[in-house]
Structures are given as C-alpha cells and as structure tokens.
Amino acid sequence: MNRIEARFQQLREQRRKGLIIYIGAGDPDLEATRQLALAFDRAGVDVLELGVPFSDPLADGVVNQLAAQRGLDSGATPPRVLATVAALRRESQIPIVLYVYFNLLHKRGVKEFIQDCAQAGVDGLLVLDLPPEEADNYEHLMAAAGLCNVYLIAPTTPEDRMELIARRARGFIYYVSREGVTGMQAKVSDTIGAMTAKIRAHTRLPIAVGFGISNPEQAQQVARSAEAIVVGSAVVNQIAAHGRSPELVPRVSAFVAALAEAVRSV
C-alpha cells in the first residue's frame, strides 16, 4: 500500500472526504513549488497533483497552459521536478501524483521514467494521453514500482470502457465532470451524482471529481457525491495572480485551506 492508498483508507476510516490540489511544477519556480506543497500539507490537502510542464498540453485550458509555460521558462524539466519531489520527501509525506503527457515518458524511456519517479518519492502517475488499452507494459512497470496508475473517466465514456478503466486503475478514479479541457466554471454539473453512482457499479476504488471546481461552495457541493474532489485551475489562477510576491505562499495556502474546510464539512 503506497501513500495514496493509505490516505484514502485513512479518509474512509475517518469518514471524511478528500481534497486533491493540482499545481504546475515550476510555477513560478521549483522552490515555490516545494514551499506551496509544504503549505498545502499543513492546510489539509490529502493528495498533491503535480503537473510536469510540457510544450503541447492539449488537455489543458488556458490557465494551466500558461502555468506549464511558466514552468518551462523556469527550467522545470522532469529531472528537476523529481529532484524537487525528493527534497520535499525530507519534510513531508503528502501523497503525490504526477500529471504528465506520455511524450515525457517516451523520451526518457517508460521503465526509466517510472523508476525515477519511484526513487524520488512519487506515488502515482496520471498520463493524460495514454489509453488503458495500450498500457499493458506501463501498468506492469507501475505495479512493479509500487506506483498507482490513475485514469480519467469522462461524461462521454461508454459503459464497457468505464468498466475496463475501473478494472485497470489503481489508487483512485478521476472523474472529469465535464467535457473539454481543464478550467474554472460558474456552475458545477448537475449529473455528477448519477455519474459517480454509475462508476461505483464497476469499482470499489475511491472516485475523485474534478475539472471546473473553483470555490469552497462548489467544493462542498461536489464532495457530497465523491470520495474526493480535485481543484486545479482556481489554485493555478491564484498562483498566477501573486507570482513571485512574498505573499504567494500565504495567500494561496489560505485559499486552499478554505477549500479544505469546505470539504471537511461534508
């Protein structure tokens, strides 16, 4: 059992809902990423989803695309991102999932990339553009390294594919609550409850719901239908607003703490 699985077991035993926060690594720089991660841990974040900057992030909306570009500009290469995770591990045991595009695994070598992640202290990977039908070798290597392979399910995912994804995922299922790319929205989908119930018919894994949650009220609403929620673009927007200001970490962590409090109240 790795940190992700242990955290969800703890949440289950305590009858609490989980909060997963996404940020882009290296935005505005890797030292800020480390400090934010530590602050999030103290603020009550259950899992950190760390985006590895990529030059062509097709699944991401404008907010996260700009974060990826800032990460690239700050020199957040995969080895440096993993070095930051390793440094973080000396101070925190917060579960970490890397949000990554397959090109970065292919460039390093899939086996080598996964081994590098395990050695650095990463707990799981969410590879945006790797379909489970083509992931036999990847899943074998992930299992051997003790890492969770997280997959996405969307509102348009057919039932038979939903069953396939649920069978092959490990750690948790990430339900994308709307079609399209990442980004904030004014109103959450009213089909989340029905869709999470549909997914639960195929798996006992926890379900995390994300894409578009942007404030504590929405976080609280969505948490009623899932084991965890994922907030990304709203946090990345806060980081962009404060940049390299000395107020970056306290302001962003205060925003995240409010989300955590909302989720805990469910």
Image (tube, rainbow, N blue to C red):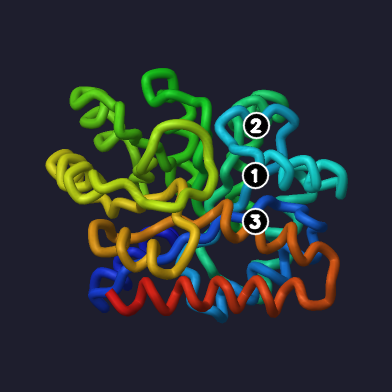
Instruction: Report the mark closest to the observer, 3 or 2.
Output: 3
- Above or below, comparing residue 115 to residue 56 in the picture: below
* Residue 64, horizontal then vertical, whole percent: 65, 44
Per the model, the C-alpha gap separating discs 2 and 1 is 8 Å
Residue identifier under label 1: 64
Q: Which residue type does callout 2 highlight?
A: Pro
Q: Identify the residue shown where x is 67% and y is 51%.
A: 24
Q: Secondary structure under badge 3?
A: helix
Q: Identify the residue shown where x is 40% and y is 37%.
A: 151
Q: Earlier in the sequence, mark 2 or mark 1?
A: 2
Per the model, the C-alpha gap separating discs 3 and 1 is 7 Å
Q: Are marks 2 and 1 in contact (CB under 8 Å)?
A: yes
- Above or below, comparing residue 160 to residue 47 in the picture: above
Quarter of the figure that contains the N terminus: bottom left
Q: Is residue 1 visible?
A: no
Q: Which mark is residue 236?
A: 3
